[in-house]
Image (cartoon, grey):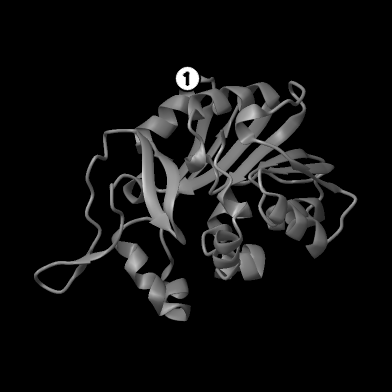
Amino acid sequence: MPQNIYDDPHFFEGYSQFRRSREGLAGAPEWPTVRSMLPVMDGLRVLDLGCGFGAFDRWAHEMGAAHVLGIDLSEKMLARARAQAPDSGVTYRLGDIEQLALSDASFDLVYSALALHYIADLDAVIAVIRRLLAPGGHLVFTVEHPIYTAPSHPGWQTDAHGNQVWPINDYLIEGRRVTDWIRPGIVKYHHTVAGYVNILLGHGFSLARLEEWGPTPEQVAEHPEMAVELHRPPFLLVAAHV
């Protein structure tokens, strides 16, 4: 049974307070890098897995995508997406990423932002994505960085010299993690960097670009609280094609 934490009222309210939730793509500091990894949108058929509030979907359509399908497991997320900007070029559908029933070779780009680390069987999902992509199609996704997902109790600590450090354990042990984020008991799935890459290669993808994202000096100057992210990358950004 898939975990649907975003329809929990307490979780949804907490998530809605984040800057990326309030401001959309402008509030996601990794977005400029992600955007540089995307193909030109003009005429593309786009599938967004875990579309959330739909900010990427609306952007893709504005950039010329022929059609955009956003899929999410959360009714609350989809209701917000539809309410923010009704758009005939974007379709939102309730669905489970692990149970996709879509036609072969029906998309030119599959995109997913901070959703695939919730997937129990990533290998199976990547196999389906490969089937859904037309020849020459692209896959671009972001996940929490494996350094972030590996620890059994993720969080900053202060060492004997007063420095903030991010302790890591169990890095090479892939699989289920249960952590506290907004509420207790959030289930995520850890993969190493090599784990992500080898799943893609195993299904015939060619890796185009890999980024261990951290804030730029300009972003740190504007948002000093981001400086701590320079000690460990919060996100892994991946671009591949078939």
Q: Is residue 19 visible?
A: yes
Q: Residue at x 47, y 79 (%)?
A: 222
Q: Which residue is mark 1?
A: 202
Q: Please determine whether, in this image, residue 173 is positioned above or below residue 238.
A: above
Give 134 or 9, whichever is nearer the viewer: 9
Give 46 or 124, whichever is nearer the viewer: 124
Q: Please determine whether, in this image, residue 9 is positioned above or below residue 145.
A: below
Residue that lies at the very extreme toward the left in this rendered image: 160
Give 240 or 105, whichever is nearer the viewer: 105
Q: Residue at x 63, y 53 (%)?
A: 7
Q: Is residue 26 visible?
A: no
Q: Residue at x 69, y 57 (%)?
A: 53
Q: Is 28 on the left or on the right of 131, as rendered?
A: left
Mark 1, Cα crowd under 10 Å, few <14 / some 14-19 / many 20+, is few
Instruction: Give the x, y percent position of residue 126.
Output: 56, 27
Q: Is 105 on the left or on the right of 9, as rendered?
A: right
Counting labels gives 1
Instruction: Give the x, y percent position of residue 207.
Output: 50, 32
Q: Quadrant of residue 167?
A: bottom left
Quarter holding the C terminus is top right
Q: Please determine whether, in this image, residue 218 is positioned above or below residue 191.
A: below
Instruction: Give the x, y percent position of residue 14.
Output: 54, 66
Label 1 sits on a secondary structure element that is helix
Q: Is 236 on the left or on the right of 38, as rendered?
A: left
Q: Amino acid at mark 1?
A: Gly
Instruction: Give the x, y percent position of residue 61.
Output: 80, 51
Quarter holding the N terminus is top right
Q: Quadrant of residue 173?
A: top left
Q: Residue at x 60, y 53 (%)?
A: 6
